[in-house]
Amino acid sequence: LRKLSSGEFYLSILIDKPNEYRSQTNGIIGIDLGIKDFIVTSNGESFDNLHHKKNKTNKLKRLQRELSRKQNRSNNRNKARLKLAKAYNKIGNQKEYYLHQVTNKLINENQIICLEDLNVKGMMKNHKLADSIQEMNFGEFRRILEYKAKWYNRQIVFVDRFFPSSKICNHCGYIYKPLKLSERQWTCPNCNSIIERDYNAACNIKDEGLRI
């Protein structure tokens, strides 16, 4: 039993039971984790970045102002602190629920899941991307996906973080070295294919994962 900062209690109950049987599937998928979309798959499916915290920015700022105006150690300050803590707790629950929705779908439909071995801590050092990366919680997504894969006998293949998945044309293999982060679409100089950056990356991650 643990008390949260919001004043609510969190109870953990351990149940010992056999793993739920989940039949194997022939599904193989590559996934590209991104900023614009949370995930784009090699099947052409995308999962939105819902911006749970960003959408509640005004409410959080208002609650923070209310807290700062209250007298220290007063009942009113404690009430304001609890309101703010509950707001953050609700955002955290919404993010976790969404992560479970996404990971359940990936695990249910695929036997092999290929994704990049991202250096999340290193990415957080980029101040322009840090808020978006923290919002999407890539680290927690990977943790949930890995333990569910073990439960249900799925295989996760990690592709090297330096593999140029976005720069390789999935049609002909040409490497477009001058690709910028801002370019969401590009035309292959070798085969003239129009490349959708994230979908192309997901396809290349799947191919590299199968090669590994």
Image (spheres, rainbow, N blue to C red):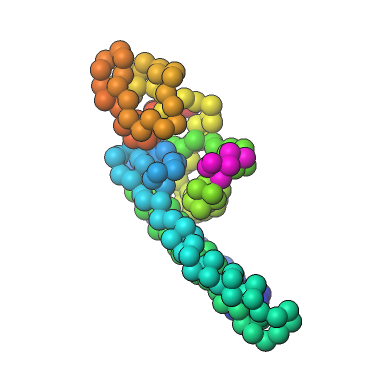
Between 30 and 64, which is closer to the camera in this rendering?
Answer: 64
Q: Which residue is rendered at x = 48% and y = 41% of the image?
A: 156
Q: In this view, does 125 lie above or below 187?
A: below
Q: Is residue 180 left or right of residue 142?
A: left
Q: Which residue is rendered at x = 40% and y = 56% of the image?
A: 50
Between 58 and 169, which is closer to the camera in this rendering?
Answer: 58
Q: Is residue 184 above or below residue 79?
A: above
Q: Residue furthest right?
A: 73
Q: In this view, does 156 lie to the left or right of 204?
A: right
Q: Which residue is rendered at x = 38% and y = 30% of the image?
A: 183
Residue 45 appears in view: yes
Kindly report the secondary structure that dominates the magenta region of the rendered protein: loop
Q: Which residue lies furthest to the top in this view?
A: 190
Q: Does the magenta stretch include residue 48?
A: no
Q: In this view, does 163 lie above or below 9?
A: above
Between 1 and 123, which is closer to the camera in this rendering?
Answer: 123
Between 6 and 139, which is closer to the camera in this rendering?
Answer: 6
> Which stretch did the figure color magenta?
125-130
Q: Position of residue 106 (x, y in %)?
A: 39, 49
Q: Which residue is rendered at x = 39% and y = 22% of the image?
A: 168
Q: Quadrant of residue 161?
A: top right
Q: Residue furthest front?
A: 69
